[in-house]
Image (tube, rainbow, N blue to C red):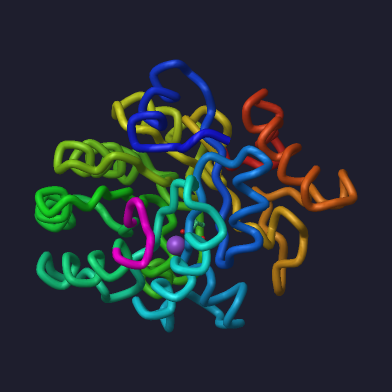
């Protein structure tokens, strides 16, 4: 796999080529994902759940993400690595810069923040300091207690329009990528058409610019329940390498996600 950058990812959107992304938390999986065609790896704060066994992502610290980002980077020099900024690590622009710098120094290529228009000042400042930003809208798990559970977002038209406006505000502030999680497929399509930056979906249907899954879901070993939007690619293929290849092939061909994986 050739080296991936923000420019190659932007070009994929322009050319209509789907972007493939998985979470990873260590060197071995990062290397395996890179070697089998994954464009982007996210060191997600989902590690609070899948690695640490928590019920949500709130206990994760910048030090946790930095440690795993360093491990992932050690697995591949070429990989495009996004590091999640954890809960309350970017509550103001100065704090966002300080914590993002820690993640960049540990090997990230980009940082990801959950939220809408309130983040624009932080995103501008991060960009000015040389730190690329990915936004995250829809079901933003750090706000689980505000939502009252892990629930689909954007079902009402007013909420949908707000999300589109948020996506445009993030882009205008300088975000170079966007993740949208657990929204109706029709809204996900509207969002990816409303911005020029690549929109990566999870539980957002196929009419976006790429797909991301938590790696534990890809291999069917998530603690607790398996989300509706994910698929166990290991069950189908019998080994890790082929599971990753099949995920990438199916995302690129449009076979994944299927209608059974989406919300309407
Ligand atoms: O933490 C994570 O794994 C994420 C993805 C689900 C997008 O943010
Ligand atoms: Na996350």
Q: Nearer the viewer, residue 76 or 241?
A: 76
Spot occupied by residue 92 in the image (x, y as percentages of width and height): 13, 69
Is residue 183 positioned above or below 257 on the image?
below
Q: Nearer the viewer, residue 140 or 254?
A: 254
Is residue 223 positioned above or below 220 on the image?
below
In the picture, residue 8 is in which quadrant? top left
Is residue 258 positioned above or below 21 on the image?
above
Magenta residue span: 105-111
| x 70%, y 67%: residue | 222
Q: Left or right: 139 with respect to 102?
A: right
User: Where does the N terminus fall, quadrant-wise?
Assistant: top right
Residue 106 included in the magenta stretch of the image:
yes
| x 41%, y 36%: residue | 199
Q: How many marks?
A: 0
| x 70%, y 40%: residue | 247
Q: Left or right: 50 with respect to 181?
A: right
User: Where does the C terminus fall, quadrant-wise?
Assistant: top right
| x 26%, y 48%: residue | 132
Spot occupied by residue 236 in the image (x, y as percentages of width and height): 87, 45
Spot occupied by residue 69 in the image (x, y as percentages of width and height): 45, 66
In the picture, residue 172 is in which quadrant? top left
Spot occupied by residue 29 in the image (x, y as percentages of width and height): 65, 59
Q: Left or right: 24 with respect to 116?
A: right
In the picture, residue 5 is in which quadrant? top left
Q: Residue furthest top?
A: 15
**Quadrant location, ligand no. 2:** bottom left
Is residue 76 positioned above or below 101 on the image?
above
Residue 38 included in the magenta stretch of the image:
no
Q: Left or right: 66 with respect to 242?
A: left
């Amino acid at each position: 796999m050739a080296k991936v950058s923000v420019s190659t990812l932007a070009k994929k959107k322009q050319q209509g080529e789907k972007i493939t992304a998985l979470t990873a938390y260590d060197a071995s999986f990062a290397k395996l994902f890179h070697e089998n065609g994954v464009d982007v790896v996210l060191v997600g704060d989902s590690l609070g759940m899948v690695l640490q066994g928590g019920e949500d992502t709130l206990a994760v610290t910048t030090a946790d993400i930095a440690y795993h980002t360093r491990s992932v980077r050690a697995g591949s020099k070429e990989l495009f690595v996004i590091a999640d900024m954890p809960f309350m690590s970017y509550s103001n622009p100065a704090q966002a810069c300080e914590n993002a710098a820690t993640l960049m120094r540990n090997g990230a290529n980009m940082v990801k923040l959950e939220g809408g228009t309130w983040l624009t000042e932080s995103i501008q400042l991060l960009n000015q300091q040389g730190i690329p930003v990915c936004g995250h809208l829809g079901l933003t798990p750090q706000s689980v207690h505000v939502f009252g559970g892990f629930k689909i977002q954007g079902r009402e038209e007013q909420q949908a329009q707000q999300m589109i406006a948020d996506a445009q505000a993030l882009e205008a502030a300088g975000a170079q990528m966007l993740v949208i999680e657990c929204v109706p497929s029709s809204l996900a399509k509207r969002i990816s058409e409303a911005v020029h930056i690549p929109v990566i979906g999870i539980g957002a249907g196929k009419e976006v610019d790429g797909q991301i899954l938590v790696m534990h879901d890809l291999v069917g070993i998530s603690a607790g329940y398996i989300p509706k939007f994910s698929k166990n690619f290991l069950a189908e293929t019998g080994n890790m390498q082929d599971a990753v290849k099949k995920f990438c092939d199916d995302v690129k061909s449009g076979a994944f996600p299927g209608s059974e994986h989406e919300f309407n």
